[in-house]
Amino acid sequence: SKVISGGWIVVAFALGLFIIMKTWMDGRMAMRKNMEAVSISLEEFVASLNEGMPVRVKGTAVFMAGNPKGMPLALLHNLKHNKVLHERTIIMSVQTIDQPRVAEENRMVITHYGPGFWHALVHYGFSETPDIPALLENLPEMPIDPMQTTYFLGRESLVINAKSRMMWMWRKKLFWFLSLNAQAATSFFRLPPNRVVEIGAQTEL
């Protein structure tokens, strides 16, 4: 009957949506584990600077980091290839918490790790849209000139490894397709495109 057919369509749609969401979450978790395996902690990085401080250039650099405890690969690659750090370097981790909105006094926790080096942990509710430039402009303890600020993003290039057993091959290919169509971090965080630098890195799955 039409009722039974319609019921199966709803079940199939719900099952397909569940598979897509589960594949996306599992894929992101697998990639995060891979990146954490080759990353170093903030404390280790700051300690290494004491052995030889790189050249500091004018301006503010904001490195977006998914892992709040590790160094973003974009910063490590930028330092490796360009051999410089900005005079004001901010590692920013944005987390969405399980409540609609976050009070402004609880929005951000800033930790100072040394001369010109900070980590900012930012919280947003699930009904809020992040606006990182506006957030930085309203920091009374750390006034930032938006025209002297550069945002660094890591551009992850996914390489499917047939030998890896993290996920079945068909799920890896589905995750690869979902990654291609994911919203760009530039628009998600409302970053000005002309102030964004993307640094690529390959990640196996």
Image (spheres, rainbow, N blue to C red):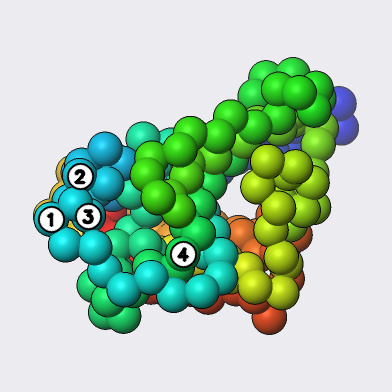
Q: Which residue is mark 1?
A: 51
Gap in angstroms between the C-alphas marked 4 and 1: 18 Å
Residue under the image location 65 percent in, 73 percent down:
148
Element under disc 4: strand
Gap in angstroms between the C-alphas marked 3 and 4: 13 Å
Residue 114 lies in quadrant: top left
Along the line of sight, the residue nearer the viewer: 73 or 178:
73
On the image, the x and y values in percent for residue 36 come to: 27, 43
Q: Which residue is mark 2?
A: 47
**Contact between labelled residues 4 and 2, with CB atoms less than 8 Å apart:** no
Q: Which residue is mark 3?
A: 49
**Contact between labelled residues 1 and 3, with CB atoms less than 8 Å apart:** yes
**Contact between labelled residues 1 and 2, with CB atoms less than 8 Å apart:** yes
Q: What residue type is disc 3 on?
A: Leu
**Contact between labelled residues 3 and 2, with CB atoms less than 8 Å apart:** yes
When the figure is inspected, residue 94 is found, relative to residue 146, above or below; the finding is above
Q: Which residue is mark 4?
A: 87
Residue under the image location 56 percent in, 70 percent down:
59
